[in-house]
Image (tube, rainbow, N blue to C red):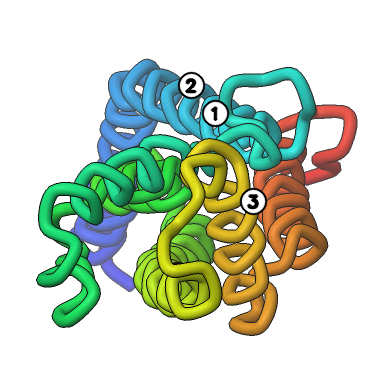
Amino acid sequence: MTFVDIKDLVQIVFWIFASSITFLTYRNINKSLLSPVNTEYQKRVLENLSVLSNKLFSELKSGTQDYRGHSLQMQPIWKQMQSLYIEDKDSTRENGIDILDINITSEFLFSQNLADEVRYDPFIPNEIREAVTTYLDCRTKVSFDSTVSSLHDTLINIDKIIEANGEVPSSYFEEDINIFLENTYLDYMDNNGFSDEIIEEMNKNIMTQILEYIDSFNPRFNKN
């Protein structure tokens, strides 16, 4: 090997080494620049997941505004139903009540609103977003259908009372209809896969999934 060959070889090795150093330096600089962005993104993800978990938990905790046992709020529905029935009794008995004229349950609003929040939240991981929206979309539909069905059954019950007594006692619209409407609604929810027990289980499953995701960022549990 001549001196020129050795010189050329040294130059080739030098440029390879220099290129490697340049690439590694660029990668480290780029990583340093992106690190604050990644940290802020992860912070937002963890914050939004914590909010989501708290909303799911609030449905299971008695004493909270969203507790399912207190959140059906059937009273506005049957009060509105009473008004429609009294104002146009014959038409109501013949044609039923248009669901668009009736308030929907708070459970419907809770499920629908939370599903939309999660669906369009860029800081919710895809696998959790999919689990939440699939569950809540189905629950929203069943809640709507259960409201319609319970209203229909209530009208039938009113007709039976009229056939037996000639009129509907005023007390029926004060207490009985609320109990009948709520029980019928809950029966439809139960029969379509959303009993209290199932809802509690589904909420806890998603909360566990969220907890596992958050734990993956905890140095105590992350060995990598």
**Residue at image location 46% in from the left, 37% down from the top:** 75
Q: Residue 26: which numbered mark, if any?
A: none
Q: Tell me the amino acid under the disc marked 2.
A: Lys
Is the Cβ of the residue at disc 2 closer than 8 Å to that at disc 1? yes
Q: Secondary structure at mark 2?
A: helix
> In the rendered view, does 112 fall on the left or right side of 207?
left
Q: Residue 46: which numbered mark, if any?
A: 1
Q: Is residue 10 above or below residue 23?
A: below
Q: Which residue is mark 2?
A: 43
Is tag 2's residue or tag 3's residue first in the polypeptide sequence? 2
**Residue at image location 38% in from the left, 28% down from the top:** 41
Q: Residue 179: which numbered mark, if any?
A: 3
Q: Nearer the viewer, residue 154 or 163?
A: 163
Q: Tell me the amino acid under the disc marked 1.
A: Leu
Q: CA distance from mark 1 to mark 3?
A: 41 Å
**Residue at image location 62% in from the left, 40% down from the top:** 56
- Circle 1: is it few (<14), some (14-19), or many (20+) Cα within 10 Å? many
Q: Is residue 90 above or below residue 38?
A: below
Between marks 2 and 3 in the image, the one whose residue lies nearer the viewer: 3
Residue 62: x and y in percent read 78, 27
Q: Nearer the viewer, residue 216 or 88?
A: 88
Q: Quadrant of the N terminus?
A: bottom left
Q: CA distance from mark 2 to mark 1?
A: 5 Å
Residue 102: x and y in percent read 23, 52
Between marks 1 and 3 in the image, the one whose residue lies nearer the viewer: 3
Q: Tell me the amino acid under the disc marked 3.
A: Ile
**Residue at image location 23% in from the left, 66% down from the top:** 5
Q: CA distance from mark 2 to mark 3?
A: 46 Å
Q: Secondary structure at mark 1?
A: helix
- Circle 3: is it few (<14), some (14-19), or many (20+) Cα within 10 Å? some
The answer to whether any part of residue 145 appears in the image is no
